[in-house]
Image: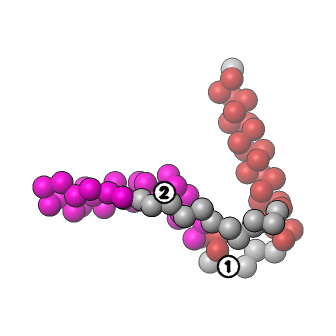
Amino acid sequence: MGNKGAVDLKEITVRVIDNDVEKAMKILKKKIQNDGLFKHLKLKKYFEKPSQYRRRKMREAIRRQKIASSRKI
C-alpha cells in the first residue's frame, strides 16, 4: 500500500502513415485506454479516502478473480 500514488510511466508511440492523423488519433486513444491512463486520471480527479481506496481495490480483486475463474471453465 506504500505505492498508492506511484505511476509507471511508459512511452506510447503512434506512427502517422500517409498523413492519416485521424487514424493515428484512434490508435493513440486505444493505446491510452488499454494502458489504464484514462482510468487513473479519472480516479485522481478527486480525493479518495483510504477506506474507499481499500474497498475499491477489494472489489477490483474480486472482479479479476471472477473473470479468471470463468475463463477456466
Q: Which residue appears at 50% of the width and 52% of the height?
A: 34
| SS assignment for the magenta stretch, majority | helix
Q: Which residue appears at 73% of the width and 79% of the height?
A: 47
Q: Quadrant of the N terminus?
A: bottom right
Q: Is residue 26 magenta?
A: yes
Q: Is residue 65 visible?
A: yes
Q: Say above or below: 42 vs 73.
A: below
Q: Residue furthest right?
A: 51
Q: Is residue 29 left or right of residue 60?
A: left
Which residues fall within the magenta stretch?
Answer: 13-41
Colour setup of the view = secondary structure
Q: Is residue 39 visible?
A: no
Q: Secondary structure at mark 2?
A: helix
Q: Which residue appears at 72% of the width and 44% of the height?
A: 63
Name the kind of residue labelled 2 in the image: Gln
Residue annotated with mark 1: 46
The residue lying toward the viewer, choosing from 10 and 72, is: 10
Which of the marked residues, 2 or 1, is nearer the chain's N terminus? 2
Q: Is residue 49 left or right of residue 22?
A: right
How many marks overall? Answer: 2
Q: Say above or below: 39 vs 45.
A: above
Calculate the distance from the C-alpha at mark 2 to the C-alpha at mark 1. 20 Å
Name the kind of residue labelled 1 in the image: Tyr
Q: Position of residue 23 (x, y in %)?
A: 25, 55
Q: Position of residue 24 (x, y in %)?
A: 27, 58
Q: Is residue 31 left or right of residue 20?
A: right
Residue annotated with mark 2: 33
Q: Quadrant of residue 28?
A: bottom left
Q: Secondary structure at mark 1?
A: loop
